[in-house]
Amino acid sequence: MHAENSNAGQRFITTHWTQVRAASSEGDSVEALDTILRHYQGPLKLHLKTRFHLSEDEADDCLHSFVEQKILTKRLLARANPKRGRFRTFLIGALDRFMISEHRRRTALRRHPQSDPIPLDELLDHDDLLPRTVPRTTEVAWARRVIECTLERMRQDCLRQKRHDIWEVFEGRLLKPILDHTEPTPYRELVERWQWDAPARAFNVLATAKRMFQRHLIGVVSEYAQDPLEAEREICELRAVVQNL
């Protein structure tokens, strides 16, 4: 769950519905569509690998076909509706239907190679067949992506403010112990490193770091949550996922 490069925070324009609408418009939607696809590529590919037992290359091929046939050709994103739930649930449901229809199409072709394939995807193309939940593996991938972006935004914020002490204390006391399963950096070392006059300074800096992380997490989630209540619920669910990693 390491943070990505220095531009990750700026690139992480999450699935705010205006972004989805821009990606589904008939005008200049290339940039918005590229942002969404790049953002969801990891979770969608992991979903394919775990649910359908695909290899890395097979998952790449299937995801490419899904994007080409459903998102680009059939303009799938134009059917996304915020009133029906989370955008990632919509995407996972569409991907599952695509995989099922592809499997049935290929099976039909093997049995009747001379006949025209039946458009089975049309039989499955109904909103009531959309799953209302996302598999846990996909939620874990989503949580990692959100946390990665939050950490990168926080790190960039520390750099802009020239508060390297905030990031180092946060990294040493919380981040590395969680990610690398190491012991937290002793407060004594942090006090000596930054030449603070008292250990209480380290405690205060860590408290500042926690507030900064929380603020950036709320900022990231608020970009794709529809309202403050959903954002709060999303943060609670993210915490539950992270605690069970």
Image (cartoon, rainbow, N blue to C red):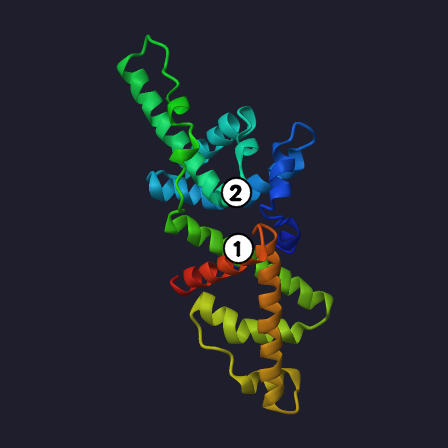
Up-down relation of residue 98 to residue 86 (above or below): above
Up-down relation of residue 61 to residue 240 (above or below): above
Q: Residue furthest right?
A: 161
Q: Nearer the viewer, residue 198 or 14?
A: 14
Percent across and percent down for residue 237 are: 45, 59
Left or right side of 219 for 113 = left
Left or right side of 146 for 48 = left
Percent across and percent down for residue 1 are: 49, 58
Percent across and percent down for residue 147 are: 53, 59
- The three-letter code of the residue at mark 1 reads Glu
Q: Nearer the viewer, residue 218 or 149?
A: 218
> Upstream in the sequence, badge 2 or badge 1?
2
Which label sits on residue 83?
Answer: 2
Q: Residues within 10 Å of mark 2 (few under 14, many from 20)?
A: few
> In percent of the image, x 59 and y 89: which residue is there?
199
Which label sits on residue 230?
Answer: 1
- The three-letter code of the residue at mark 2 reads Lys
**Residue 1 appears anywhere in the view:** no
**Residue 207 appears anywhere in the view:** yes
Q: Secondary structure at mark 2?
A: helix
* Quadrant assignment, res 36: top right
Give the Cα distance between marks 2 and 1. 12 Å
User: CB of mark 2 within 8 Å of CB of mark 1?
Assistant: no
Q: Residues within 10 Å of mark 1 (few under 14, many from 20)?
A: some
Which quarter of the rendered picture does the C terminus lie within?
bottom left
Q: Residue furthest left?
A: 111
Give the number of callouts.
2
Up-down relation of residue 200 to residue 211 (above or below): below
Q: Secondary structure at mark 1?
A: helix
